[in-house]
Amino acid sequence: MKLYSMPSSGNSYKLRLLLALLGRDYERVDVEYQTEALDQAHESGALPFGKAPALHLGDGRVLAESNAILCWLGEGTDFVPQDAFARAQMLSWMFWEQNQHEGVIAVRAALLSYAHRKPEATPQRLADLLERGTALLQVMEDALKGRNWLVGDAISLADIGLYAYTHTAETRGGFDLSPFPALRAWLDRIAALEDYVGLDG
């Protein structure tokens, strides 16, 4: 397998984390913003939807979209619940991550982290994203109160998918996580997993 991965992107990182936890071997091609490697990946057609990540299989098939790749990699593993309703709950969190969470938490971090996004980082937009993002983090806090994982009694793809941008929400996005003790404990549990790798790992 060959993974076209953007090193600074949570969407790419969630795949690197799952692959590490599964102990899967793969070739990694880094395609960071504003690099020749990214330009080459676009020109070669390596990124089907024009963005990373993209997973190229040995038989020539290519899979895009981070959560679709998570589902494919997680098929048949303990990261996907056997119960049909629990699987649907897992998917609902993954859809929420892309539809709600990523577009706020990740966007605020991007505006503060990437030089080419600085013109978009107006005080009003940053304040709006901070307010909306704090409400989304509260949703996660409420769901994690009294439980270790988002779905059932074990870690699932829902946790992997949401960890990616949540664990840097404070350091890169400027969100205050101190009001969310259950969320912070959840972050610590994932970081303590055997074979865990960080964003820069």
Image (spheres, grey):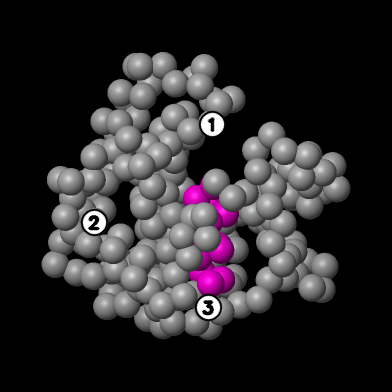
CB contact under 8 Å: marks 1 and 2: no
Q: Nearer the viewer, residue 111 or 101?
A: 111
- Tell me how far mark 1 sits from mark 2, CA to CA: 26 Å
Task: Determine if residue 147 is in view.
Answer: yes
Q: Secondary structure at mark 1?
A: loop
Three-letter code for the amino acid on which mark 1 is drawn: Tyr
**Alpha carbon separation for disc pair 2 and 3:** 24 Å
Question: What residue does disc 1 label?
Answer: 114
* Residue marked by disc 2: 183
Please give the count of numbered marks on the rendered protein. Answer: 3
Which span is picked out in magenta?
A: 9-20
Mark 3, Cα crowd under 10 Å, few <14 / some 14-19 / many 20+, is some
Tag of residue 10: none
Question: Relative to 3, is 159 on the left or the right?
Answer: left
The numbered mark, 3 or 1, whose residue comes first in the sequence reads: 3
- Residue at the location (48% across, 33% down)? 113
Secondary structure beneath dot 2 equals: helix
Residue position for label 3: 22
The crowd level at tag 1 (other Cα within 10 Å; few <14, some 14-19, many 20+) is few
Locate residue 1, reporting x and y percent: 72, 70
Q: Earlier in the sequence, mark 2 or mark 3?
A: 3
Question: At 69% from the left edge and 47% from the top edge, which residue is drawn?
Answer: 31
Q: Residue furthest front?
A: 201
Camera-nearest residue between 94 and 83: 94
Relative horizontal placement of residue 107, taking residue 31 as reference (left or right):
left
- Decide whether the magenta segment is chiefly helix, strand or loop: helix
First in sequence, mark 1 or 2: give its number.
Answer: 1
Q: Is residue 100 visible?
A: no
Disc 2 to disc 3: CB gap under 8 Å: no
